[in-house]
């Protein structure tokens, strides 16, 4: 297996997600052994969307992650840079205001959203720090950010097993269920290269967010980071 390149240009990553859009949600459920649904529930709790609040769901893909916020009565904007993902999402949820946008240059005014969130998408942004600053810019004073991202398991023996699963089991499983298995080899590589929990928290602080904290899900396979924009 050739190692995936992690210096992909944004258009390459967008094209890769266009290719997997149709079966993306199914593939995620299979590869995460059903954990993806649990993680989405935890994100919804952390975002704590309320009626009439505005929520930006960045890297929303087909908007599966946006639905829990919508059910609370919040106004949710699913935003993604993969047109293929947005088209599949629009077919499934035609009432939602799908928006094409690059995380490093968001097409929204300053101080627009009560909450901004991104799940499993920050790794795929070319400039992480620029994206964190953009999320800060479009958030209202007093608003919040919630980031759900693959991270580093906290227990060393489990971390070893998990890394082996990523690099050995994930590609063949992806070949069986995905329309573009190479995309999942890239995703496995990007997960291994991603900073750990304290390092991501520090990047949030540098982007301006305050009261930054995180908690681990599934032993640290995934971490939820949260921060606030000061009034």
Image (spheres, helix red, strand yellow):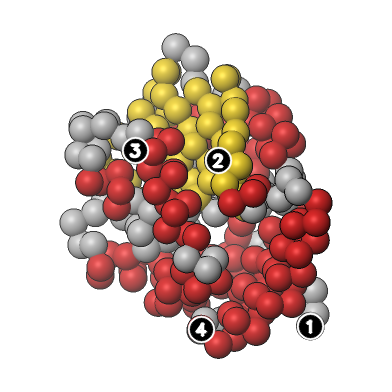
Q: Distance between the residues labelled 4 and 2?
A: 27 Å
Q: How far apart are marks 3 and 1 (CA)?
A: 40 Å
- Disc number for residue 55: 3
- Disc number for residue 177: 4
Q: How far apart are marks 3 and 2 (CA)?
A: 17 Å
Q: Nearer the viewer, residue 119 or 75?
A: 119
Question: Which residue lies at the image location 72% right of the left edge and 34% below the top edge?
Answer: 198
Residue 207 relative to residue 83: left or right: right
Tell which circle, 4 or 2, labels the residue nearer the N-terminal end: 4
Q: Is residue 177 above or below residue 78?
A: below
Which residue position holds label 2? Answer: 224
x%, y% of residue 4?
Answer: 75, 72
Q: Which of 65 and 59 is in front in this view?
A: 65
x%, y% of residue 172?
Answer: 65, 84
Question: Which residue lies at the image location 23% right of the left edge and 62% below the top edge?
Answer: 93
Between label 2 and label 1, give the one nearer the viewer: 2
Question: Which residue lies at the image location 80% right of the left edge and 80% below the top edge?
Answer: 2
Which residue position holds label 1? Answer: 1
């Amino acid at each position: 297996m050739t190692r995936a390149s992690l210096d992909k240009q944004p258009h390459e990553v967008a094209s890769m997600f266009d290719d997997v859009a149709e079966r993306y949600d199914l593939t995620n459920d299979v590869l995460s052994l059903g954990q993806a649904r649990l993680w989405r529930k935890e994100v919804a709790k952390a975002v704590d969307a309320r009626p009439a609040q505005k929520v930006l769901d960045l890297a929303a893909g087909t908007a599966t992650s946006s639905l829990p916020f919508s059910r609370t009565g919040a106004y949710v904007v699913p935003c993604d840079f993969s047109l293929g993902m947005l088209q599949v999402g629009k077919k499934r949820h035609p009432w939602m205001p799908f928006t094409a946008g690059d995380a490093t240059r968001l097409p929204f005014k300053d101080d627009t959203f009560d909450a901004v969130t991104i799940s499993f998408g920050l790794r795929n942004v070319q400039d992480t720090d620029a994206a964190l600053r953009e999320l800060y810019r479009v958030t209202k004073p007093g608003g919040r950010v919630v980031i759900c991202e693959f991270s580093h398991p906290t227990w060393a023996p489990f971390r070893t097993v998990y890394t082996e699963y990523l690099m050995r089991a994930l590609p063949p499983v992806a070949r069986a269920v995905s329309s573009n298995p190479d995309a999942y080899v890239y995703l496995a590589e990007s997960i291994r290269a991603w900073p750990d929990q304290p390092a991501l928290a520090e990047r949030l602080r540098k982007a301006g967010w305050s009261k930054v904290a995180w908690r681990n899900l599934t032993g640290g396979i995934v971490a939820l980071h949260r921060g606030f924009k000061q009034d």
